[in-house]
């Protein structure tokens, strides 16, 4: 009886004593990766105030509430998603340092960002091959998401990104020669949180897979003949960066995205098209795509 009791106690102590390592996301922010259902788990983690505060009597707060642990190095239990902002304080109560502990439920469904139609959380696009690209996301409306960290790189070279003012996108610029062939993909990491729950998102892509030309501009429409220019943001020279176009003629009062069978529909390389159908009114639609990648079409431009 006693033996069993001691054995059980020993197991409990072992479980509680085991201190999990924290992953540093950025200075003062760490992630606790939790496998399985985090709601049923309690993990002991160790926090340090900092080497330079060795001789001071240190006490701690979690989210502004005093906790019992004292000293430079403490162990605290993190239950479910209840991470927090741990601040260590000197004798007169002043904040010496802080560590934001976020819980990353590794096998949990992601919930802070919303998926797009392609089941991706992050949508990236480039207008050309000059090195500028943009990635965006949508916040789940029922959560109060905050960006914690982001980074982008290609084959270990850092890519400069900045967070958009609306907090829902990154504008990135890679210093590269637009002619150079892409051998490796760009890796983009975005870390967000809601309260003390962390979520990590990754995208890896080639620029040539996300390049979406801007709308073409129709420059002339006369006698059923339409002329357009390549989008201003498209790469020059045209001989090296050609575009192909889809043109279609549809019934008036329909939008170009209408899926009904068009009156005329062709794929061409020229930047002009003569409508052969002689009805009095129609909508003319044109969009562009890089013929070498066949990936993303520009949005339609239309003329009624
Ligand atoms: C403050 O705490 C962080 C961990 O969150 C640690 O990396 C850093 O070195 C500490 N700062 C000082 C001045 O000790
Ligand atoms: C955590 O606490 C520190 C020190 O009071 C503060 O500067 C920081 O903004 C807090 N962070 C969060 C996410 O609350
Ligand atoms: C990737 O980086 C390594 C080391 O910096 C370099 O040797 C290699 O040539 C790079 N590969 C490409 C495809 O740029
Ligand atoms: C990164 O972008 C910032 C802001 O646009 C700029 O000030 C900085 O010079 C850029 N750094 C590099 C290495 O391009
Ligand atoms: C880049 O992303 C891919 C796919 O997610 C991943 O397998 C790879 O390890 C990443 N590379 C680095 C250096 O993180
Ligand atoms: C357009 O140009 C591409 C590449 O030069 C070529 O493969 C394709 O056959 C051309 N399409 C038409 C309709 O002429």
Image (cartoon, helix red, strand yellow):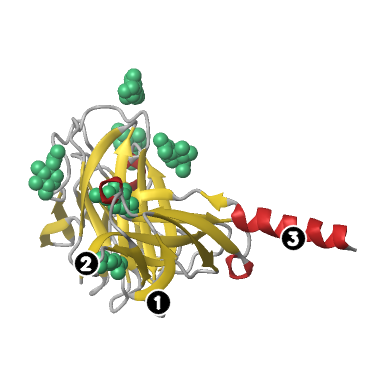
Q: Tell me which numbered mark, 3 or 1, is placed earlier along the sequence.
A: 3
Q: Residue at x 73, y 56 (%)?
A: 11
- The reply to whether callout 1 and callout 2 are in contact (CB within 8 Å) is no
Residue 206: x and y in percent read 35, 39
Q: Is residue 259 visible?
A: no
**Residue 184 located left or right of residue 214:** right
Q: Nearer the viewer, residue 157 or 274?
A: 157
Residue 123: x and y in percent read 35, 57
Q: Residues within 10 Å of mark 2 (few under 14, many from 20)?
A: few
Task: Tell me how far mark 3 sits from mark 1, CA to CA.
Answer: 40 Å
Q: Secondary structure at mark 2?
A: loop
Residue 62: x and y in percent read 38, 70
Q: Which mark is residue 143?
A: 1
Q: Which residue is mark 2?
A: 94
Asked where in the image residue 226 lies, by quadrant, the reply is: bottom left
Asked where in the image residue 152 lies, by quadrant, the reply is: top left
Task: Tell me how far mark 1 sits from mark 2, CA to CA.
Answer: 32 Å
Q: Which mark is residue 9?
A: 3
Q: Is mark 1 within 8 Å of ligand 2?
A: no
Q: Residues within 10 Å of mark 3 (few under 14, many from 20)?
A: few
């Amino acid at each position: 009886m006693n033996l069993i009791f001691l054995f059980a106690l020993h197991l409990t102590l072992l479980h509680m004593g085991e201190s999990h390592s924290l992953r540093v996301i950025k200075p003062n922010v760490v992630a606790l990766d939790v496998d399985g259902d985090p709601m049923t788990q309690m993990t002991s983690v160790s926090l340090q105030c900092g080497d330079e505060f060795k001789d001071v009597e240190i006490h701690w707060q979690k989210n502004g509430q005093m906790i019992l642990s004292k000293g430079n190095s403490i162990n605290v239990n993190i239950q479910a998603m209840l991470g927090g902002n741990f601040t260590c304080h000197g004798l007169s109560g002043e904040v010496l340092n802080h560590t934001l502990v976020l819980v990353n439920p590794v096998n949990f469904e992601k919930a802070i960002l919303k998926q797009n139609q392609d089941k991706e959380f992050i949508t990236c696009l480039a207008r050309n091959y000059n090195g500028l690209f943009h990635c965006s996301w949508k916040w789940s409306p029922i959560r109060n998401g905050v960006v914690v960290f982001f980074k982008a790189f290609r084959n270990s070279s850092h890519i400069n990104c900045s967070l958009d003012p609306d907090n829902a996108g990154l504008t990135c610029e890679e210093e590269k020669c637009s002619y150079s062939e892409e051998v490796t993909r760009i890796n983009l990491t975005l870390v967000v949180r809601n309260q003390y729950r962390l979520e990590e998102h990754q995208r890896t892509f080639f620029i040539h897979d996300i390049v979406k030309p801007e709308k073409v501009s129709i420059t002339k429409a006369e006698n059923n003949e339409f002329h357009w220019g390549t989008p201003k943001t498209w790469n020059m020279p045209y001989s090296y960066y050609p575009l192909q176009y889809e043109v279609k003629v549809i019934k008036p009062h329909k939008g170009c995205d209408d899926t009904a069978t068009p009156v005329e529909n062709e794929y061409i390389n020229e930047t002009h098209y003569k409508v052969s159908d002689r009805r009095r009114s129609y909508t003319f639609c044109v969009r562009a795509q890089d013929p070498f990648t066949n990936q993303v079409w520009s949005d339609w431009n239309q003329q009624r």
